[in-house]
Amino acid sequence: MKIHQVYTASELRNFTYLIELENRSAIAIDPWDEAVVNKLLSENQLSLKAIINTHEHWDHIQGNPALVAQHGCEVWAHENGWGKIPGLSRTLVAGERIALDTDMELQVLDTPGHTFAHLCFLLLEQSQIKAVFTGDTLFSAGVGHCRSGDAQALYQTISEQFHRLPDEVLVYPGHEYLENNLRFTLSLEPGNVNAQTWLKRAVESDPTVEPIITCIGDERLFNSFFRLDSADIRERLDCLTATDQQVFIALRSLRDNW
Ligand SMILES: [Zn+2]
């Protein structure tokens, strides 16, 4: 099994993923367009078995119609995606496991907040969590906006489903926003040495050559939405005695207008 992470260089800096399986089939996650998927399929001599959409926003589904027409593949997504996700043929529910190669599986997480049709996917190897595909729920150093969702629901998703993940779990997000998100972190915590170090790396990197991948342990160090007990963040938000949920919602609101 191999994971192809493709930076699309689109205006919204989307990532598309292709999971290559040993039997020469593949699963595409959030196809930005058909071209990016077809190029990988032909380069690696793969057939497209299914598309997974993390959620219903146009920039995560616009490759669906052409790929379904060309490959006759299935489309898997959240049940609230009916009527919104082109070609949807199978709905997935929390806890469900999708077999990949021997000992490799995807496990479905139902992750409301960014939208109410949002799924994330744990990548399991011999039932150990190795990585997580996060769509627009969790980004490197940030989280998704809640303009078509709800910040309180996103707080619950992050605190209940992501905080518990082991530090070494890799994060495969739906967009490349690392540099901008780290600048947001530093606007709140100017003395965050980890954010400073990673910002330098982000500025020097080129995602079209090799995107920077973080793990959950990194997120605990520089993702403001994982750092709700930070005195600097709480002071900046005038939330010194607020609950974590209140801090999260205030942070999300600040980020919306930042
Ligand atoms: Zn979205």
Image (cartoon, grey):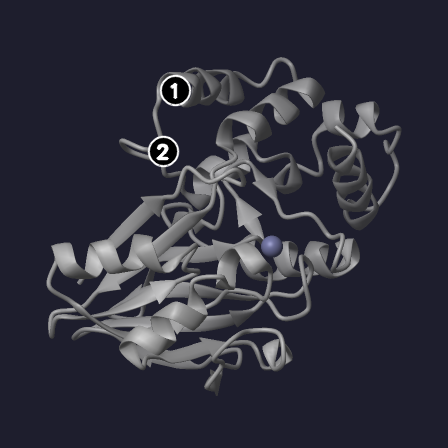
Residue visible at 26% across and 52% down?
A: 4
Contact check, label 1 and label 2, Cβ < 8 Å: yes
Amino acid residing under circle 1? Arg
Out of 11 and 19, give the one closest to the viewer. Answer: 11
Residue 70's quadrant in the figure?
Answer: bottom left
Residue 192's quadrant in the figure?
Answer: top right
Residue 120 pos. (x, y %) = 50, 64
Q: Quadrant of the N terminus?
A: bottom left
The answer to whether residue 189 is left or right of residue 166 is right
Q: Secondary structure at mark 1?
A: helix
Please tell me which of labels 1 and 2 falls first in the chain: 1
CA neighbours of label 2 inside 10 A, class few (<14), some (14 to 19), many (20+): some
Amino acid residing under circle 2? Ile
Q: Which residue is mark 1?
A: 201
Find out if the beta carbon at label 2 lies less than 8 Å from the nearest ligand 1 atom. Answer: no
Q: Which residue is mark 2?
A: 212
